[in-house]
Image (tube, helix red, strand yellow):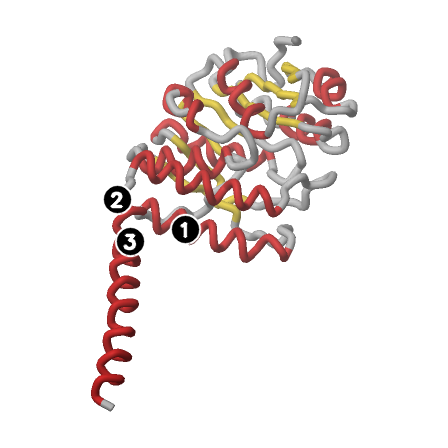
Amino acid sequence: MVNIPVFGKKKPQLTIVIPAYNEEESIGGVLEQLAALREDIPARVIVVDDGSADRTAAIAEAAGAEVIRHRRNKGYGAALKTGIREADTEFVLTLDADGQYRPVDILKLWEVAADFDMVSGRRTQLLHSALWRMPGKWALGWLANFLSRTRIPDLNSGLRIFRREVISRYLHLCADRFSFSTTSTLIIMNRGYAVAYEPIQVNSRQGKSTVSLMTGYETFLLILRVVLLFDPLRVFVPASLLLVISGILLGIYPYFILKKGLTT
């Protein structure tokens, strides 16, 4: 493990955690852009290589980042948890390794971080998302907004700053896979922490995405799990009303059919 922060010579105030799985095409460029910000933010950079079969770890080490290796692929969320637990600064920033997020947008989040427990990038356009994902993204977003009783501008942005003490309390509840972003957002929003969203732009990802339809299904189940844990009535009251209304309708229909038969 190489303990060399990429940003600046001052004591790090921020730890940047980058989960990476087979991202040799993009990780070097991401770290190069981070290095260009060294004068603005003194930060420690940790790349968590999640069992990659390519040169991701070697490229990250050559760029001067700390590298933590998982012997096997544990998942996006598991890699983030490893990096967050290793962090020793007041704030932790999560950044994807695929090149979609622009490191320059970190400055926007950092400028307001001191006043909040979580600052998330709000993607102003999702033009780079596959069309087949859009209905699922909309449905999951609507469900999360309804169940959390609040409007969430960007449910699963991969560029966010957390107050380390806050997110560390709930790591055991966050998902080990891609749903980490969704579950951590819902938990922090439901617990009443101070949250802000800053507009950011995204690029097309480099390399191949590993997100599948199963990821959406897992996210749906995890949204229900989080809400049942912190606000169960938000699920049970609508479900109970639906059952009551269904029971009434099922009871009324045979009543009128039977009544009609008796009067003819």
Q: Tell me the amino acid under the disc marked 1.
A: Leu
Quick one: label 1, few (<14), some, or many (20+) residues within 10 Å? some
Question: Label 2, label 3: how many angstroms apart (C-alpha)?
Answer: 8 Å
Q: Quadrant of the C terminus?
A: bottom left
Q: Tell me the amino acid under the disc marked 3.
A: Pro
Residue indicated by mark 1: 143
In the image, 243 versus 250, the foreground residue is 250
Quick one: label 2, few (<14), some, or many (20+) residues within 10 Å? some
- Residue 53: name its quadrant: top right
Query: Would you say 164 lies left or right of 53 here?
Result: left
Question: Label 2, label 1: how many angstroms apart (C-alpha)?
Answer: 15 Å
Pinpoint residue 9: horizontal percent, then vertical percent.
57, 12
Quick one: label 3, few (<14), some, or many (20+) residues within 10 Å? few
Q: Which mark is first along the chain, 3 or 1?
A: 1
Residue indicated by mark 2: 233
Residue indicated by mark 3: 238
Pinpoint residue 161: horizontal percent, then vertical percent.
46, 30
Q: Tell me the amino acid under the disc marked 2.
A: Leu
Q: Quadrant of the N terminus?
A: top right
Q: Which mark is first along the chain, 3 or 2?
A: 2
Question: Label 1, label 3: how many angstroms apart (C-alpha)?
Answer: 13 Å
Find numbered disc 2 in the image and state the secondary structure of the residue it sits on.
Answer: helix
Query: Would you say 40 lies left or right of 63 here?
Result: left
Residue drawn at 76 percent across, 28 percent down: 24
